[in-house]
Image: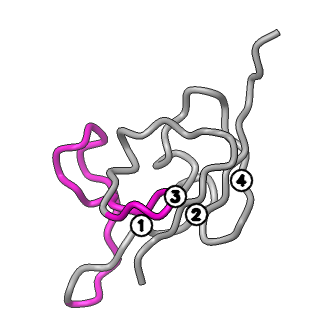
Amino acid sequence: MKRSNVQLSIDGIAVEVPAGANVAAAVAQLGLRFRRSRSGEARAPLCGMGLCFECRVSIDGVAHQRACVVVARDGMQVQRDD
């Protein structure tokens, strides 16, 4: 039987999303911003297909991952930049 949801952690907050959802959907589900610009403005995905790089997060210790193109996996640890 195929699982219908996966559970991951974003800044230590557990979130469950449908299997096949991307990391950006998980961040959005929690209502969190993605990153801040150098001037401090909150940024969010603009394109949703990996071109704009506005949704960058660290995933399992690897920085600058585009959340909109990475499929969420069970146990994944996501950190937003601050």
Q: Nearer the viewer, residue 46 or 53?
A: 53
The reply, left or right, for residue 43 in relation to residue 11 is: left
Kind of residue sitting beneath label 4: Val
Q: Reading the chain from its start, which is encountered first: label 3 or label 2?
A: 2
Q: CA distance from mark 1 to mark 3?
A: 16 Å
Is tag 4's residue or tag 2's residue first in the polypeptide sequence? 4
Circle 4: element type: strand
Mark 1, residue position = 34
Q: Report the residue that reaches farthest toward the front.
A: 61
Q: Position of residue 29 (x, y in %)?
A: 61, 52
Label 1 or label 2, whichever lies nearer to me, is 1
Q: Is residue 42 magenta?
A: yes
Assess whether mark 2 and mark 1 are in contact (beta carbons under 8 angstroms). no
Disc 2 secondary structure class: loop
Look at label 1 and name its amino acid: Phe
Q: Quadrant of the N terminus?
A: top right
Return the x and y of residue 30 as percentages of the image width and height: 63, 60
Range of residues picked out in magenta: 39-63
The total number of labels drawn is: 4
On residue 15, which mark appears?
A: 4
